[in-house]
Image (cartoon, helix red, strand yellow):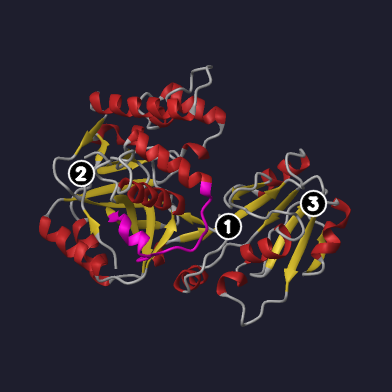
Amino acid sequence: MVKIKPFRAIRPKRDKVGLVASRSYLTYTKSNLKEKLENNPYTFLHIINPDYNSKKKITYKEKLKKVKNKYLKFIKKNILIQDNNENLYIYQQETLDQKYIGIIACVSAEDYIKKNIKVHEETITNREEKFKEYLNEVGYNAEPVLLTYNDNEIINNLILKHIKNRAEYEFTTTNKVTHKMWIISDSRLIMKITSCFEKTHNIYIADGHHRIASSSLLHSEKSISNKYYLKNSDYFMCYLLPFTQLKIINFNRLIKIKNHIDKSKIIEEIKKFFTVKKINSPEYSPKFENEISMYFEGNWFSLLYNKIESNMKISKQIITSILSDKILTPILGIIDEKTDEDIKFVEGNICISKIKREIDKLNYDIAFILKPISIKQLKKVADNDEIMPPKSTYILPKLRSGLTIYNLND
């Protein structure tokens, strides 16, 4: 059960929404990012990267001030406008093979603190603190946390009925994804939807563990320090989507071997836990739930784990945990994946050939390719109040930054 509420979104004007809304800046290469910034004066990337043309190094705090100033300029120029009334928003994203449709709303930070919202992954501490500072300094949240729940026929029908009306936004992006958004302003409909979520059990974080953790930190510290004075930090913005619409892909790992570790003994150590088979192939992805593929010293290997026991915790049966517990920590010395600088997490939609090049160029020493976990596994872990290692899942859909913005000072 969670408390959701409508809010007065700050959002692009209808005629500019396709130009403003952007992917996460982390998904752009340097050249693509430069091209977007130089050729599109309306992209939200200008707010996130206000100093992209500057050669002068500035501190993180100075950058955040520039971010806030750029954001306020977008509002002053009426590129971004704020709704007069508190609304809920239906957002639909349609790809060539899948359609996602859910509700953008605000959820109480207390629901996260009280564990009414279930988690399934660890967070990386310094990212929590960094994003908390970001929220406090810039005063807005432009990326909703993705929450998920069991299909609810009442909510589904209310959404389907409302989207028969004209969409406020409809635009297609260059990656062939069509985006639509409808505004729910009717107070009776808002009440019906909020009431449904108050009665819905088992709300889960699908994507955005760091964002929600940072928002809750900001909320908690607001009550004990006047340093955090934002009026609306009791809530965070989210996108609520049924389980059946989620798509889970994997996060892979790149590792730099620490100086004290003998590379020649790594495979023999792995054989203590896994059946290891060399694969004569230019690329290799795991085929079984308990299999990991490894690229090391120019060769691909299949690592098959056959020691899963029924009395093991659910989270320990997940392949990311097996990798952590049997290889990363005891063999490669990665004690804390949340803070160790010798591990890099790579989204599963990055092609294996690119990961292989990272190893061949000696930027990293070993690559581990994992199979995606299932929604059933995710729910089991969360329902048991257990957690998986950080970056165990890469979940779609990914929302565009700047489509709806939650004003923390409203």
Which of the image's four quarters has the N terminus? Answer: bottom left
Helix, strand or loop status at disc 3:
strand
Relative placement, left or right, of 129 versus 271 is left
Q: Residue 242 at what x, y percent from top left?
A: 36, 64
- What amino acid does circle 1 point to? Asn
Give the CA separation, mark 3 to mark 1.
Answer: 20 Å
Q: Earlier in the sequence, mark 3 or mark 2?
A: 2
- What amino acid does circle 2 point to? Arg
Q: Earlier in the sequence, mark 1 or mark 2?
A: 2
- What amino acid does circle 3 point to? Phe
Q: What residue lies at 20% left-to-right and 37% top-to-bottom?
A: 82
Q: Residue 277 at what x, y percent from top left?
A: 82, 65
Which of the image's four quarters has the C terminus? Answer: top left
Q: Can you identify the residue that label 1 sits on? A: 250
Helix, strand or loop status at disc 2:
loop
Residue 314 vertical placement versus 282 (above, below)? below
Q: Earlier in the sequence, mark 3 or mark 1?
A: 1
Q: Can you identify the residue that label 3 sits on? A: 296
User: Any magenta on residue 114?
Assistant: yes
User: Any magenta on residue 196?
Assistant: no
Relative placement, left or right, of 354 versus 97 is right
In front of the other: 301 or 106? 106
Which mark is nearer the camera, 1 or 2?
A: 2
Q: Residues within 10 Å of mark 1 (few under 14, many from 20)?
A: many
Q: Are marks 1 and 2 in contact (CB under 8 Å)?
A: no
Helix, strand or loop status at disc 1:
loop
Give the CA separation, mark 3 to mark 2.
Answer: 52 Å
Give the CA separation, mark 1 to mark 2.
Answer: 35 Å
Q: Residue 266 at what x, y percent from top left?
A: 83, 57
In front of the other: 162 or 321? 321
Q: Can you identify the residue that label 2 sits on? A: 8
Q: Residue 223 at what x, y percent from top left?
A: 30, 49
